[in-house]
C-alpha cells in the first residue's frame, strides 16, 4: 500500500499518517540549514508580520483600553491570515500527485522536536566546558537573564525549557494538526509566536499583548495536560524514571505554577527524574518568585540535562507511536 502511494501519489485517508510522517521527518532532519538559509522559515514569516503590526499599532502613549483593542486586532489578523494560508496550501496540495508528502514536509517545519533537542544538548555540552559557555548556550532557549544563573541554574533552565516546549513545540502542534489539519497547525504556530513576541507582562506589552497571551493559554490548555500525561506514561517504561512520583508531583504542583499550562510538564519531569524545577528566577526586567515544582534536587548538572533529554525523546517516541496506532485502528 505504501508503494502504491509513493508511485501514484494518492493522498492517504486521514491526517494521522501525515502527522506521523511529519513527526518522523522533524525528528530525523529538523529544520535543514541549507533550506532555511535560502527561503524564510514559516515561523520567521509570522514573526515579521507580528513585528510590523507591533511597530504600527503599539503606541505606548495610548490608553490601556485602546492598546488592548489594538493588540487583539493584531492577534486576530495574524491568526486568521495564518489559518487562511494553511487552508489554501492544504487545498492546493490535495490535487497534486505526492501532495501529501509535501504536506508532511511542511508540517514538520512547524514541529520543533529535533530543534529543541539539539539546542538543549548543546547547553549540556557547553556547560560541561564552563559556566560562561553554558550561559551563552542557554540564552538561545530561555528568556531569563543568563548572567544571573550559576551552573545549576543553567542546567535547571535547560531542563525547564525541555519540559515546557515538549508541549508548545511538539504536542500542541500535533494536536491542532490532528484536529484541524494545516489550517489548525498554522493558526496554532501564529498564536504561539504572538505569545512569545508580545505576550509579556512588561510595560510595553502588558496591555497590547493581553489577547495574545490569553489565546495562547487557551490553545495550550489541553495539549499541556496531554503532554504531562505522556511524560507520566513513558516514565513507567524508562529505566531510572518514576511514573508514580511524576503523577503525584504533577497533580500537586502543576496548579501552583504561574502559568496555567507550563506546570503540568515541568512538574511531571521533576517528579519523574527526582528534580526540583521552577522556583525563584530572574528575567531581564523582573524577578519571579515561583514555587518549586517537585521535591528533589535543584543543583542540576549536564548529566541531568541529558537525563531530561532521554525522557523527552521517549515521550516524543510514545506520541508518534500513539499517532500511528490511532491511524491503524481508525
Image: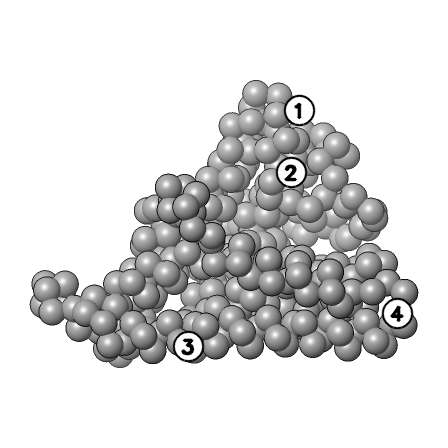
Of mark 3 and mark 2, the one earlier in the sequence is: 3
* The label number, if any, that marks residue 139 in the structure image: 2
For mark 4, what is the residue? 62
The residue positioned 64% from the left and 45% from the top of the image is 142
For mark 3, what is the residue? 87
On the image, the x and y values in percent for residue 63 come to 90, 72
Q: Is residue 128 left or right of residue 170?
A: right
For mark 1, what is the residue? 132
On the image, the x and y values in percent for residue 304 come to 55, 36
Image quadrant assignment for residue 154: top right
Residues packed near mark 3 inside 10 Å, few (<14), some (14 to 19) or many (20 plus): some
Are the residues at dot 1 and dot 3 in contact (C-beta closer than 8 Å)?
no
Of mark 2 and mark 4, the one earlier in the sequence is: 4
Of mark 1 and mark 2, the one earlier in the sequence is: 1
On the image, the x and y values in percent for residue 32 come to 38, 44
Of mark 1 and mark 3, the one earlier in the sequence is: 3
In the rendered image, the quadrant that contains the N terminus is bottom left
Amino acid at each position: 500500500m505504501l508503494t502504491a502511494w509513493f508511485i501514484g501519489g494518492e493522498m492517504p485517508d486521514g491526517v494521522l499518517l501525515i502527522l506521523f510522517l511529519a513527526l518522523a521527518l522533524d525528528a530525523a532532519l529538523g529544520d535543514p540549514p541549507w533550506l532555511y538559509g535560502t527561503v524564510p522559515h514559516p515561523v520567521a514569516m509570522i514573526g515579521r508580520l507580528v513585528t510590523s503590526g507591533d511597530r504600527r499599532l503599539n503606541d505606548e502613549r495610548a490608553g490601556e483600553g485602546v492598546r488592548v483593542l489594538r493588540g487583539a486586532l493584531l492577534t486576530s489578523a495574524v491568526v486568521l491570515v495564518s489559518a487562511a494560508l494553511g487552508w489554501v496550501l492544504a487545498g492546493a496540495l490535495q490535487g497534486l500527485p505526492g501532495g501529501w508528502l509535501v504536506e508532511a514536509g511542511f508540517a514538520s517545519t512547524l514541529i520543533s522536536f529535533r530543534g529543541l533537542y539539539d539546542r538543549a544538548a548543546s547547553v549540556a555540552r557547553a556547560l560541561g566546558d564552563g559556566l560562561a559557555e553554558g550561559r551563552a548556550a542557554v540564552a538561545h532557549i530561555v528568556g531569563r537573564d543568563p548572567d544571573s544563573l550559576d551552573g545549576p541554574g543553567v542546567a535547571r533552565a535547560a531542563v525547564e525549557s525541555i519540559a515546557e516546549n515538549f508541549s508548545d513545540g511538539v504536542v500542541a502542534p500535533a494536536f491542532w494538526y490532528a484536529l484541524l489539519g494545516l489550517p489548525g497547525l498554522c493558526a496554532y504556530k501564529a498564536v504561539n509566536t504572538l505569545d512569545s513576541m508580545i505576550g509579556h507582562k512588561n510595560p510595553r506589552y502588558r496591555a497590547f499583548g493581553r489577547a495574545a497571551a490569553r489565546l495562547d493559554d487557551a490553545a495550550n490548555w489541553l495539549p499541556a495536560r496531554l503532554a504531562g500525561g505522556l511524560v507520566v506514561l513513558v516514565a513507567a517504561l524508562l529505566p531510572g524514571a518514576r511514573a508514580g512520583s511524576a503523577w503525584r508531583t504533577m497533580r500537586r504542583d502543576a496548579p501552583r505554577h504561574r502559568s496555567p499550562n507550563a506546570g503540568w510538564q515541568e512538574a511531571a519531569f521533576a517528579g519523574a527524574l527526582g528534580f526540583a524545577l521552577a522556583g525563584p528566577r530572574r528575567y531581564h526586567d523582573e524577578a519571579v518568585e515561583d514555587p518549586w515544582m517537585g521535591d528533589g534536587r535543584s543543583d542540576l548538572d549536564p548529566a541531568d540535562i541529558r537525563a531530561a533529554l532521554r525522557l523527552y525523546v521517549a515521550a516524543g517516541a510514545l506520541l508518534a507511536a500513539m499517532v500511528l496506532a490511532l491511524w491503524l485502528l481508525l
